[in-house]
Image (spheres, grey):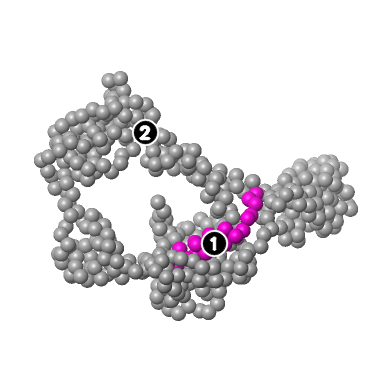
Amino acid sequence: MKTAVEELSPTRVKLTVEVPFDELRPSLDAAYKKVAQQVRVPGFRPGKVPARIIEQRFGRAVVLEETLNDAVPKLYGQAVDEVDVFPVSQPDIEVTKIDDGEQIEFTAEVDIRPNFDVPDYKGVEITVDSAEVTDADVDAQLDALRQRFATLTGVERPATSGDFVVMDLRAEIDGKNIEEQQASEVSYEVGAGSVLQGLDAALEGMSAGEEKTFRTELVGGENAGEEADVIINVKSVKEKVLPELEDEFAQLASEFDTLEELKASIREQSRRNKLIDQVVQARDKALDALLEQIDIPIPDSALKAEVDARKHNLEHQIAESGLSRDAFFRLYQTTEDERFAEFETSSRKAIKVGFVLDKIVKAEELGVSEQELTNFVVRRAMEMGVQPNQLAQHLADNDQLTLAMVEIVRDKAKAVLGDSAKVVDSDGNEVDLKAIYTEINGEPVEEDAEADSAEAAEATAEAEDKPQA
């Protein structure tokens, strides 16, 4: 087989592949067997029709077509490996010549990862946040804990922001009650920011036993987007009472006997979280610094596929929310146009990141061990609330194990970038990432890039998996 490459653009090539007919022999034999199974010829059992009879009855063209359907995709894969290009789209393949018994020729146009060089990433200077834990940090964690253990106490006064009300709601359009727009005994925090515009303003100043009507746009159901009168009937008003900061609270909210022990635990956990954040920041900032030095053209097909995937996920989210489109975007304080523009920007960066990390994976000869793949599956299964073996089977059945391994080695490549950088915190102190790995994992880090990157990936998995705002 001989392959020639023509560059159509920095992100698209045309392969011209010439294949001697002898190399088609396995596919030709398979084609005869397949056709023999499909045809019925008197005097022959299914699958036992000789090749010459098939050609006499149905023509050589039928067999050649089946042969090419089987052989060309495989030959295309071999050609790609031979010329060392990295396709990022499905190829447009055309068989241009069939010289029966001699050779065939086909072309394949495909979008590829463009050629580029990765600059030296050793010693890049990165600044991350300080890991120092302040009293304010501890107080913020304590306040969040107090909020979790707050109690609601009924009050005989009008509702204000932060109070909880129990209410009945119903909606009317032109005086007609909308059955699906009714709810009873709804508990709601005034000022929480309901997608039902006007609700918070209407509740401010209402007392138990009062009723009020306000006009707004419905956000769900068959009448989503229509103007309606919403009638509120407040049943009760309660204020949130936070527990006092004392030893009794520590015993209620934790396994500790005293408030000082609880504070010490919070301080230590906050420090641990800040150390993990330093590692994540070092990796992300080192990658961003590298991206700024490289101008990579993005294949149109790859960009379209990435944007379309994000739009598809968005449509699914909107459908699952039960909200109208306007209400959904209002809930997230954005617009459809803004979200689509963000998709364009983030998709370009995601593709560029993938290209760069794949280069580093190859340069550093990073791989995935069986244990790393197992750890990945277990961690993802815990996040999804499923059994690890169930997720592993799903990945295998849907040919997604390769994607999982790509994600793992790319994370390891980001770890290599972070480890290669010169990292200081915002106070000017040098940050030793390997010392952080040792502290978090509880064991020394081996002295090689593969081990370091694996330790980094494990150390930062928890932080990377946190939900983003």
Residue segment shown in magenta: 278-299
Q: Which element is circle 2 on?
A: loop
Please report whichever mark, 1 or 2, sits nearer to the chain's N-terminal start.
Answer: 2
Tell me the kind of residue under disc 2: Gly
Q: At x 18% / y 30%, what residue is drawn?
A: 211
- Direction from residue 139 to residue 336 in the image, left or right: right
Q: Along the line of sight, which residue is nearer the eye, 7 or 171?
A: 7
User: Residue 388 sits in which quadrant?
Assistant: bottom left
Can residue 64 be seen in the rendering of this structure? yes
Can residue 63 be seen in the rendering of this structure? no
Q: Real-space Cα distance between discs 1 and 2?
A: 44 Å
Q: Which mark is residue 220?
A: 2
- Direction from residue 206 to residue 122 in the image, left or right: right
Q: Main secondary structure of the magenta part?
A: helix
Residue 111 image offset from top left, x and y in percent: 68, 50
Q: At x 50% / y 71%, what residue is drawn?
A: 422
Quadrant assignment for the N terminus: bottom right
Q: Along the line of sight, which residue is nearer the eye, 68 or 187?
A: 187
Q: Which mark is residue 144?
A: none
Q: Outermost residue, left direction? A: 156
Q: Which mark is residue 289?
A: 1
Quick check: marks 1 and 2 in contact, CB under 8 Å? no
